Image: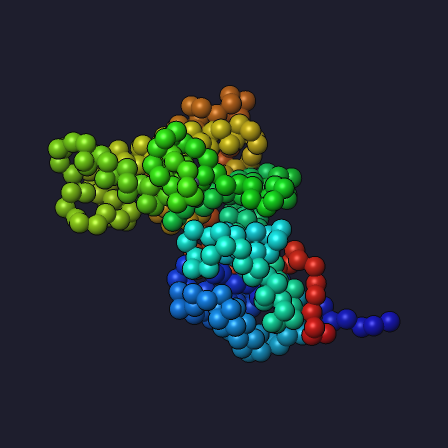
Amino acid sequence: MAQGKIKTRVVGVDIGLERTTTAVVDIRGNILGKDDFPTSDYPNISDFASVLCDNIITLVQAHGGYETIRAVGISVPSGNYRTGCVVNSPNMPWKGVVPMAAMLRDRIGLAVSLGNNAHVRALGEQTYGAAHGLKDFILITLGTGMGSCLVSNGVPHLGQDGFAGEIGHCCAVPGGRQCGCGKKGCLEMYTSKKGIVMTAQELLADSDAPSLMREVDTLTLSYMIDCCEKGDEMAIEVFNRTGKTLGLALANYASVFNPEAFVFTGSVMCAGEWLLKPTEETFQEHVFRNIAGRVKFLSSELEKEEMDLLGASALAWEVEEYSLFK
Ligand SMILES: [Zn+2]
């Protein structure tokens, strides 16, 4: 009988707009070593794949060698788990359909799986974070854009083509703000970072009322939160409006899927209660009454820098083993 050594490590990769981070992660979610390089230096996908592979090879050799690695998991915007492709990303430099998982598998000889940020984070939270032990929950990411992943009976619901969960592109305001996806009035144009700043700019333009937000040339989310802390009524109103829009959308989402919890991740969550309080108030007002008061609002407890790496490593455990290195 062939003696197989159990492989107890995976490689997690987080491809962000600016940086790509790689890590060797063990079975308990300990990050044994990591490295990173600038994503934006490689607008050519073939160059990017080569640099990423070199990076993974060096990292793996420094942490136990190829024989210990079971698979590679990747978190990438617009990543499609079913096909292993990055599909029409509005923000990444590579256009069209990029077969990233296949490109990497061919180069490094290991199984490679990829998913979008929301899918990967849902797995990370389920394995290591706030959703541990939950079977039915909805992970929400709020940052540059807005995404979600519905986990039903312990399994992410990906849909026929792998594009399920695109709540950011559900219509919140018919004929509203132009979205990067080509449609108008998408939810993320009101709830993402840029959406919240646009709401502030509209409020400022619509009145002469005093506001600390008038004192800077470029509004940022963190500055607006400072304004809230100082009692700036208009800044508080920006988050109240955002929370109303978000709370209504989440109420509809929960009424359809009856989750135990929403788990919130992403840079917009630094707004904390300024955003979550009006969101939850509107949510309770609109959600189906048998569900009202039953859905928990949880924030991710994973370190921001590790969240996507841990999620990607959780994804790596899901892929069927394939390795040229026995
Ligand atoms: Zn859209």
Work out which quarter of the rendered image holds the C terminus and state it: bottom right
x and y percentages locating residue 245 in the rendered image: 38, 32
For the residue pair 241 and 182, the one nearer the viewer reads as 182
For the residue pair 168 and 179, the one nearer the viewer reads as 179
Give the residue displayed 21% in from the left and 43% down from the top.
Answer: 227
Residue 28 appears anywhere in the view: no
Which residue reaches farthest right?
1
Left or right: residue 50 versus residue 113 is left
315 versus 208 height, above or below: below
Q: How many marks?
A: 0
93 versus 107 height, above or below: above
- Coloured how? rainbow
Work out which quarter of the rendered image holds the N terminus and state it: bottom right
Residue 5 appears anywhere in the view: yes
Give the residue displayed 59% in from the left and 66% down from the top.
Answer: 103
Give the residue displayed 49% in from the left and 61% down from the top.
Answer: 14
For the residue pair 194 and 281, the one nearer the viewer reads as 194
43 versus 163 height, above or below: below
Left or right: residue 2 versus residue 163 is right
Q: Quadrant of residue 3?
A: bottom right
Give the residue displayed 28% in from the left and 40% down from the top.
Answer: 198
x and y percentages locating residue 130 in the rendered image: 51, 47
x and y percentages locating residue 308 in the rendered image: 49, 57
Which residue reaches farthest front?
96
